[in-house]
């Protein structure tokens, strides 16, 4: 059964587009038919992060307005079997599309793919409303900063008001060293406030900057962030991959917990 | 889209319409709000509804609105009030998304909420407010009476908003961004630690004081005698 999943955050710059690109690529590598939809009309980025910018002919607004057929606007990613991109328009703005049109578009995509991953723009205005229309699940991306968590909370509330209550959380740019020093919110703090299921934690990794600039998703590599995204993909597919939530995995309690869980597994 | 705010009052539900909205938009918004929240309105057939509109409505317009109200409420319980009669507060805010307003209706004046309030959500009430859930930073509770949060209170709470300095704010975990009781305002000290036990905020000698909650304390009775 196909799923339409919106990747959203409220705050900008927390890694929505990177997450969309990597989860989509990861799912395609697992043999799924995936389409990435960039709804950030006027400020499109997903095509750049995917390295597909130069192949854009038609875009989402063209499809919605009937200038072209859906198939003409979809860009096949030749590197990964089953992965396609529907780019946003760069010369238009978010008011050129309405939620009803988005619902229709999502329905059409749903018929042709296993996963429709929607990259949502920052903010809570028309772009957000468009992106969440027609979605049946959401991934909230946040970083361990108070302001980002505050915005994520707002977004969860707005999604809930739209009947989307199954949202899961992805904590991006997590820095274990800073958390240990007490300089960064830890996972437990964030989950305490947001109170939604955790889908994964992606560590801060300088290799991400390079991979985004090159247009090659990091999920294909063995970097820590790449590994983390692979784990998230597995969880999306229903595999049981343990989350490392413990505050300090070298501490006494964590060690005890490990010993006990090992016994339980045996 | 702005337009309509639902408010719980002692007498029933007050529906505030944006005075500047065109009638068609008004109608659509009302229909939308009622369909979106059938849970809130579904079983309230006996509730009195005052529709407060910023201008005089034509009879034809009233009939059309009544038709919509009638699907959810007893149409005989609906009365139209012009905003001029109830003062300036009775017009819907002109800014903000409709979903911004989480002002929920309430029948008896007090409210019982079974959910966590998140950033941007605001609840106003002429009675007391009880929340079974957390109140997150950025959320606001405003009550003429007391506020009880059976969870973490991390947002803004204003008890005794109409001037009752005897009102209190109680929470299992009281870590508010800001507390207000009547016309007093308090913020937490910067180095405040999580206490791990329930606390209650009340007015004491003209200031807001937070003390551990002790059901047997003799101070409890004095709390009302500020």
Image (cartoon, grey):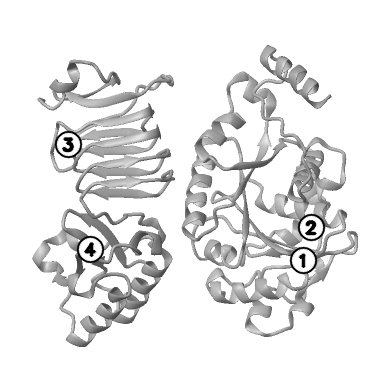
Q: Badge 2, how many Cα within 10 Å: few under 14, some, many 20+?
A: many
For disc 4, the marked residue is B47
The residue drawn where x is 59% and y is 52% is: A166
Residue at the disc numbered 3: B182
Q: Nearer the viewer, mark 1 or mark 4?
A: 4
- Looking at the rendered structure, the secondary structure element under dot 2 is loop
- In the image, taking residue A98 as reference, residue A27 lies left or right, namely right
Question: Are the residues tagged 1 and 3 within 8 Å (C-beta)?
Answer: no
Q: Are marks 2 and 4 on the same chain?
A: no
Q: Tell me whether marks 1 and 2 sit on the same chain.
A: yes
Residue for badge 2? A50
Q: Which residue is mark 1?
A: A85
Q: Is residue B93 visible?
A: no
| Of labels 2 and 4, the one closer to you | 4
Mark 3 belongs to chain:
B
Pointer 3 local density, CA inside 10 Å: few below 14, some 14–19, many at least 20: many
Q: Is residue A7 above or below residue B68?
A: above
Q: Position of residue B142 (x, y in %)?
A: 26, 44
Of A172 and B117, which appears nearest the observer? B117
């Amino acid at each position: 059964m196909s799923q339409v999943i919106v990747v959203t955050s409220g705050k900008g710059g927390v890694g929505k587009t990177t997450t969309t690109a990597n989860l989509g690529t990861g799912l395609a590598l697992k043999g799924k038919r995936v389409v990435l939809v960039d709804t950030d009309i006027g400020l499109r980025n997903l095509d750049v992060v995917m390295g597909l910018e130069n192949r854009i002919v038609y875009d989402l607004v063209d499809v919605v307005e009937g200038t072209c057929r859906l198939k003409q606007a979809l860009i096949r990613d030749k590197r990964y079997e089953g992965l396609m991109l529907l780019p946003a328009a760069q010369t238009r703005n978010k008011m050129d599309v309405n939620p009803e049109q988005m619902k229709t578009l999502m329905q059409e995509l749903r018929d042709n793919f296993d996963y429709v991953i929607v990259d949502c723009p920052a903010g809570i205005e028309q772009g957000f409303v468009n992106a969440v229309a027609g979605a049946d699940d959401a991934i909230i991306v946040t970083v361990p900063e108070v302001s980002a968590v505050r915005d994520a909370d707002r977004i969860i509330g707005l999604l809930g008001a739209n009947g989307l209550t199954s949202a899961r959380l992805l904590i991006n740019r997590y820095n274990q060293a800073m958390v240990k020093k007490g300089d960064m919110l830890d996972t437990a703090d964030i989950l305490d406030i947001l109170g939604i299921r955790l889908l994964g934690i992606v560590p801060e990794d300088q290799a991400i900057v390079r991979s985004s600039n090159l247009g090659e998703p990091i999920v294909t590599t063995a970097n820590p962030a790449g590994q983390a995204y692979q784990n998230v993909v597995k969880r999306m597919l229903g595999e049981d991959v343990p989350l490392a939530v413990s505050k300090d995995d070298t501490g006494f309690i964590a060690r005890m917990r490990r010993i006990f869980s090992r016994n339980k597994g045996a | 889209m702005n337009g309509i705010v639902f408010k719980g009052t002692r007498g029933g539900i007050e529906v505030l319409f944006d005075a500047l909205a065109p009638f068609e938009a008004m109608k659509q918004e009302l229909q939308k709000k009622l369909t979106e929240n059938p849970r809130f309105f579904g079983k309230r057939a006996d509730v009195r509804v005052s529709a407060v509109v910023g201008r005089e409505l034509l009879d034809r317009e009233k009939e059309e609105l009544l038709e919509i109200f009638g699907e959810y409420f007893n149409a005989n319980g609906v009365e139209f009030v012009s905003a001029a009669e109830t003062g300036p507060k009775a017009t819907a805010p002109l800014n903000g998304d409709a979903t911004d307003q989480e002002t929920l209706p309430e029948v008896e004046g007090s409210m019982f909420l079974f959910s966590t309030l998140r950033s941007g959500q605001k609840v106003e009430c002429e009675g007391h407010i009880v929340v079974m859930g957390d109140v997150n930073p950025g959320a606001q509770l405003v009550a003429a009476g007391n506020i009880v949060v059976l969870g973490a209170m991390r947002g803004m709470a204003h008890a005794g908003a109409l001037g009752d300095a005897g009102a209190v704010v109680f929470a299992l975990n009281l870590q508010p961004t800001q507390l207000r009781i009547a016309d007093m305002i308090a913020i937490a000290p910067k180095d405040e630690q999580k206490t791990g036990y329930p606390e209650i905020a009340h007015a004491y000698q003209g200031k807001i004081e937070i003390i551990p909650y002790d059901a047997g304390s003799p101070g409890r009775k004095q709390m009302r005698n500020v």
